[in-house]
Amino acid sequence: MKLLTHNMLTSHVKGVTKGYPLLIKATEVKVNEVDFNPQFVTRMIPKLEWSALVHAAEELGQRQDLPDELVPEYENNEEFLKKVHRVLLEVEVIEGCLRCPESGREFPISRGIPNMLLNEDEV
Amino acid sequence: MSSQDEDGTVEPGHNTAEPSTSSSNENDETTEDIITVTIGATVPTGFEHTAAEEVNEKIGVDARISKDRGRIYFPITTDKLFQVHLLRSVDNLFVVVEEYDHYQFKESKEETLMEMQQLASKLPWTKALEVWKRNGTLKKKKGYRKGGNGIKVKPNSEATDAAVADTEQQELPQAASAAECLTKAENTADMETSTQELEETAPEAKPIKFRVTCNRAGDKHSFSSNEAARDFGGAVQEFFQWKADMTKFDIEVLLNIHNEEMVIGIALTEESLHRRNISHFGPTTLRSTLCYGMLRLCKPQASDIILDPMCGTGAIPLEGAIEFNSSFYVAGDNNDMAVNRTVNNICHIQKRRAIKGSASGLPIDTVRWDLCNLPIRTGSVDIIITDMPFGKRMGSRKKNWDLYPSCLREMARVCTPGSGKAVLLTQDKKCLAKAISRMGGLWRKLHTVWVNVGGLHAGVYLLKRTGAVFGQTPEDVYESRGTVNAEGDEKGDKELS
């Protein structure tokens, strides 16, 4: 699971109102090289929940001094964009789990695939 | 065997030998003349225009769409030949030997077949054979990826298999007798040179092996595709002194007849390219060329988030991650085998890329989820693209009745109001059409492409997400026009689940 995906994932357990962002507990993390596309990163940043991304990167020990808040004019800062590119696309959680911040319900991650299926009583 | 000089046709054997002696055995493309030929391509029916667009974009020429569905034609110069192998919307490629728009078939079967036999020696084979030869060199040089990576794909048409079998049975006795009439020394020398050039392998002479595949459509023909393939194939064999072989052929000659349109070509692709990305198949894996066509329809932009909520083996998002790689793909399915196959297919491609030395990672992720209850933030997805259960091999018609509206509703929730799009493939057109009209406040139909998927008539629906804010549209009531202008409220609905 890449952190870009994590940024969109939310807990949908019945009754939960604050199911985002999911907490990450990782037992295996991999870093994979992905072609850098500055336009992709620049356009993606406004769509992200920035603090959730930074927090997730921190949970994995991959924060690499990303700021708490976005700096202005980041579009022209290639070093910054490359760091964002790395945490969005290159860092992957292979084994571990995601935890709903409100209910504590855990969703396992195996082979990089988070299993978000709910049981019948949770829907 | 006589030599004919009409229209640049020449004695077989001699001219195929000439280019080999004028250029060295290795890839000396600069000394070879550049010739222009017409290339034919088979594409998924319904996506002819998409394919023509791709040809225009990548090769810079205008393609002509044939009346014979699923085929396009375009000119190309041999120095640009490698570009045809970059096309993602074509299943098979061939070089045209000759085209007849209004071929007047004779009244009787005997006369028609006789004429076809005579045709074999009159056709302008030289240029096409030269292109075939260069294409063979290209494939070896570039380490051309074969479609399917070892997965054998059965030929689509059973009629053609039969035609080929007939050809083989008929031809062997003729070959023996024809060979006897020729000066053995001359014949062997020509064949040796040409096969060496073509195969670049064994030092011993090997006769070229070929087969003829005939596709015939039309109700006014007096002959069958079997008969045409057999007789035409027989004459081709006699003319070139090639050996007929149904399975291990070097050259595949194509005879395509559609009413009065007849095209003779030589195949440039060995296996169909349509299964190129998939090594782990599932029960309903979609052709990569069809996936490509669907993706082109929705025009992915840089940083678009593209979801396939029923991904199966991941064919669509994987094709996207490779071909439209400035977007990000999330492939999801509720089925355990499906998500595992998807990950296997992704890994396979990544390994292949790593071997070639490029960055192996792809912009794609896989999640196991329930598509009617997606664990995705509202309004965070730009495009939804998927192959919906047809109700034949997967699911059932009755299930579709409940599934389709729920799907559309949940897809509308996660999709960005106003700008979001959906591209949905289904054979259960009635069910989907009904579901779309029920969700009229959330989805608007933009365009439909009628396609053929494994013999079933299916539709690819391109939908646009209305500006209506989710949660204000009652599911079963047709929405009035007023709420469509609620684009400004988009942010208000970003509440998280």
Image (tube, coloured by chain):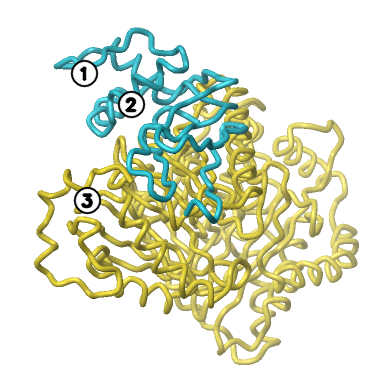
Chain colours: A cyan, B yellow
Sequence order check: which comes first, mark 2 or mark 1?
Answer: 2
Q: Secondary structure at mark 2?
A: helix
Q: Does residue A122 show up?
A: yes
Which residue is pictured at 68% across the width and 65% down the height?
B213
Viewer-nearest residue: B288 or B169: B288
Q: Specify the amino acid type for callout 2.
A: Ala
Residue position marked by numbered label 3 in the rendering: B419
Viewer-nearest residue: A101 or B282: A101
Q: Specify the amino acid type for callout 1.
A: Leu
Residue position marked by numbered label 1 in the rendering: A70
Q: Nearer the viewer, mark 2 or mark 1?
A: 2
**Pointer 2 indicates a residue of which chain?**
A
Q: Secondary structure at mark 1?
A: loop
Viewer-nearest residue: B475 or B427: B475
Give the residue furthest to the bottom.
B107
Q: Specify the amino acid type for callout 3.
A: Ser
Location of the N terminus of chain B (image quadrant): bottom right
Q: Position of residue B128 (x, y in %)?
A: 56, 51
Inter-mark Cα distance, 3 to 2: 25 Å
Residue position marked by numbered label 2 in the rendering: A52
Are the residues flagged by discs 2 and 1 in contact, CB closer than 8 Å? no
Q: Position of residue B95 (x, y in %)?
A: 54, 53
Q: Secondary structure at mark 3?
A: loop
**Pointer 3 indicates a residue of which chain?**
B
Q: Residues within 10 Å of mark 1 (few under 14, many from 20)?
A: few
Q: Relative to residue B62, is residue B20 depicted above or below? A: above
Inter-mark Cα distance, 3 to 1: 25 Å
Q: Is residue A92 left or right of residue B488?
A: right
